[in-house]
Image (cartoon, rainbow, N blue to C red):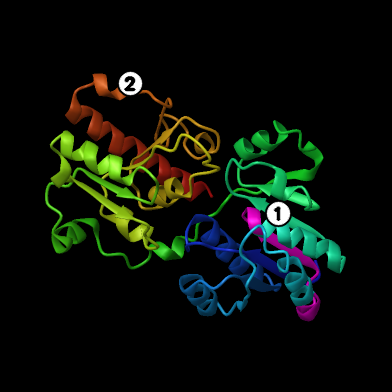
Amino acid sequence: MDALTVLTVITPARYSGAERMAVYLADGLQERGHRVVFACKHNELMLAELAARDIEAYPLPIAGKLNVMSPFLLAWLAERVGAQVIHTHLSTAALWGSVAGRLAGIPTVASVHALNRKDCYLYADVIATCSEGVRDHLVGQSVEPGRLRVLRNGVDPGQFEGLTPADEMRAAERWPDIVCLLVGEGDDRAKLQEQAAALGVAENVRLLGYRHDAPRVMQVMDAVVLASVAMEGFGVCLVEAGLLRKPVVGSDAPGIREVIADGETGFLAAVGDLSPRWRQQPRRSTARRFRELTRSAWSDRQSES
């Protein structure tokens, strides 16, 4: 295949899941001889990651679904860099990047990273979903199946190199008797704090908020749980946890069940199920079996790949 110039468009609020996937993909494309140029709103962490990989980036005022100048800016940049394909990530970028592609006569690919509504993605020539679950979600909204391609997320193993051993991190960070680290942001933070206080476990719960160094945080954990019940398209953190040899539990929901082979690489729990099947077994034997099962399974999967 001849080398391509790809304009990647994303409007990041954080440097998190979709943003990291976009950077990993761009890095891989450049290693294969293609040129990738980013158009994004200003985000210090993401720009630093791109610079570290020698990926061109143009911070532009393209945020917001009412920002009608965005497609004209993107079409101008696409023509300036000689883009042959426009690849978008997330809904706002998909909307304006696809319109820009039509203005400039350039084909567009829109990546969908969650169980989104179809509206912002309909102008793309090809819609790439991160899982079969997301694909099925869009088909359920009457999107033509022939326009959809499943392009599962990948994780860069290099980000786990050189991490401090878990035991040393626990001692160094002085988090004794930790029960639960909650990573991420949301509207229920105050409710969770109140619930922890009411249950008498406030000292055993840490609400860490948004963290761009999630692998480092997961390294200190004994197990990783993804309890999402809506919008989750894939569950990258479960793959990252597997690379760290951490036992994993996830909701039995679209996308997540494509990452966890239930009883093989981890466990799936039905959404809303507060009495999972392993709770009925003796705690020590369950914990031991849990660690042995998932760690050996992830090791086997990685060696096969």
86, above or below 294, in the image: below
User: Can see residue 4?
Assistant: no
Q: How many dots with numbers?
A: 2
Q: Residue furthest right?
A: 105
Side of 174 relative to 269 (left or right) = left
Q: Dot 2 corresponds to which residue?
A: 277
Side of 13 relative to 286 (left or right) = right
Residue 93, position in %: x, y? 66, 60
Q: Please tell me whether residue 91 belongs to the stretch shown in magenta.
A: yes
Residues at marks 1 and 2, CA–CA distance in whole angstroms: 39 Å
What residue type is disc 2 on? Arg
Picture quadrant where residue 32 is located = bottom right
Tag nearer the camera, 1 or 2: 1
Picture quadrant where residue 72 is located = bottom right
User: Can see residue 230?
Assistant: yes
Residue 246, position in %: x, y? 33, 46
Q: Residue at x 57, y 80 (%)?
A: 54
226, above or below 105, in the image: above
Q: Residue at x 29, y 40 (%)?
A: 191
* Element on which disc 1 rests: strand
What residue type is disc 1 on? Ala
State which region is magenta: 79-92
> Closer to the camera, 132 or 78?
78
Q: Dot 1 corresponds to which residue?
A: 110
* Element on which disc 2 rests: helix
